[in-house]
Amino acid sequence: MLDAINDDKYYQIPQGTPVLVTGATGFTGTVLIKKLVEAGLMVSAYSRESSNRDPLNDLNLKWFIGDIADEKKLQQAVMGQEYVFHLAAALRDTKSTKQEYWNTHVRSTQIICEEALKNPEFKRYIHVSTVGVHGHIDYPPATEEYRFKPGDDYQRTKLEAEIWLIKFARENSFPYTIIRPAAIYGPGDKRLLKLFKMSVKPFFILLGKGKCMYHLIHVDDLTNAIIIASTHPKARGEVFIIGADEPIAIAEIASIVAAHFRKKFRVIRLPIGPFFLAADVCEAICKPLKIEPPLYRRRVAFYSKNRHFDVSKMRNVLGYFPQHSNIAGIIETTDWYVARGWMKP
């Protein structure tokens, strides 16, 4: 699992070093923790009370259970750590409030950094954000310096956390690196399940007339890049977009899945406007009732946005080249879905 990052040039964290991972039971957090434990580090994990910790039960971890914005609990977790990997993120659904997003993304960042600053042995804070802070990319490909245009409270608070961190670090000479992942996928996650299931149907529906470019990152590549960034001297105080070598159109993802099962489909394009209207009605009715709407604006907007990023900084500064091509990663994930009975070819 660590073959891709075992070269000496990647400045590995010494065995036995105390590190903390927040968002420990999430998709990326689980993969990252397994790699850190395999590398011989002394890993602490932070998660919500409601999180499923079973996938990590067989690992030697020190657990901190609580709300990520619980100041005392989070301070206890950060105390004595030499590295903190802050992956915790609010659940992105209609039940989450702006205050919950702010607490999870901004307040937790403030607590961690202020506590870590007290430790003279602290080495690096790895802040995992999102390429969503850039919004729709009008002039692709977008670099780390591309203008910000977050589209919802999740993305807005992610950006606010980044801005606060950069200012705090500048004023206190605090060591940090910001990671902006593209769309994370791979075995262990259901992010692409609905799309893949649509790909084996006779018709594949697209909304609007756009190319609908999507930028993926396999969770294995993302976690490798995160580990490298945590110690690379040139990564201190820098921001990195982490993505596959190239973006991919949604229809091309579907074509890869269909071809894998020797199937064909016909692309049907529908006007996007009526779906935005329907989504607004669904949200207006469902949100006051605290129920998940069958359709909401963010899902419809997915078809209207371009997400094409420039990952040359990841390659040129971190020296990391993704190990998973789009095709190989998509097929691997497809087979994983099938093996678990989540989709039928």
Image (spheres, rainbow, N blue to C red):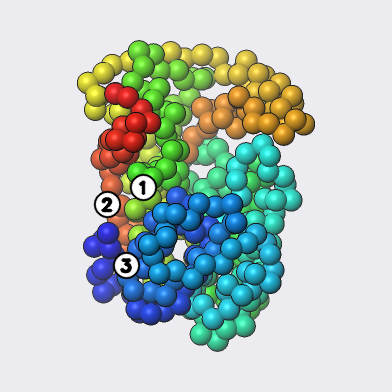
- Amino acid type, label 2: Gln
User: Which residue is tagged 1?
Assistant: 218
The reply to whether discs 1 and 3 touch (Cβ–Cβ < 8 Å) is no
Q: Label 2: how many residues lie within 10 Å, few (<14), some (14-19) or many (20+)?
A: some
Q: Residue at x 75, y 30 (%)?
A: 289
Q: Residue at x 72, y 34 (%)?
A: 290
Image coords of residue 146 (percent x, y): 54, 49
Q: Give the secondary structure at mark 1.
A: strand
Image coords of residue 280 (percent x, y): 69, 24
- Amino acid type, label 3: Glu
The reply to whether discs 3 and 2 touch (Cβ–Cβ < 8 Å) is no
Residue 278 sits above or below residue 115 on the image:
above
Distance of label 2 from label 1 (alpha carbons): 9 Å
Q: Residue at x 50, y 51 (%)?
A: 52
Q: Label 1: how many residues lie within 10 Å, few (<14), some (14-19) or many (20+)?
A: many
Residue 126 visible here: no
User: Which residue is tagged 2?
Assistant: 323
Image coords of residue 49 (percent x, y): 60, 56
Q: Find residue 282 and report its image quarter.
A: top right
Distance of label 3 from label 2 (alpha carbons): 19 Å
> Tag 1 or tag 2, which sits nearer the N-term?
1
Residue 77 sits above or below residue 223 on the image:
below
Q: Give the secondary structure at mark 3.
A: helix
The reply to whether discs 2 and 1 touch (Cβ–Cβ < 8 Å) is yes
Image coords of residue 250 (percent x, y): 40, 29
Distance of label 1 from label 3 (alpha carbons): 19 Å
User: Which residue is tagged 3?
Assistant: 38
Q: Quadrant of the C terminus?
A: top left
- Amino acid type, label 1: His
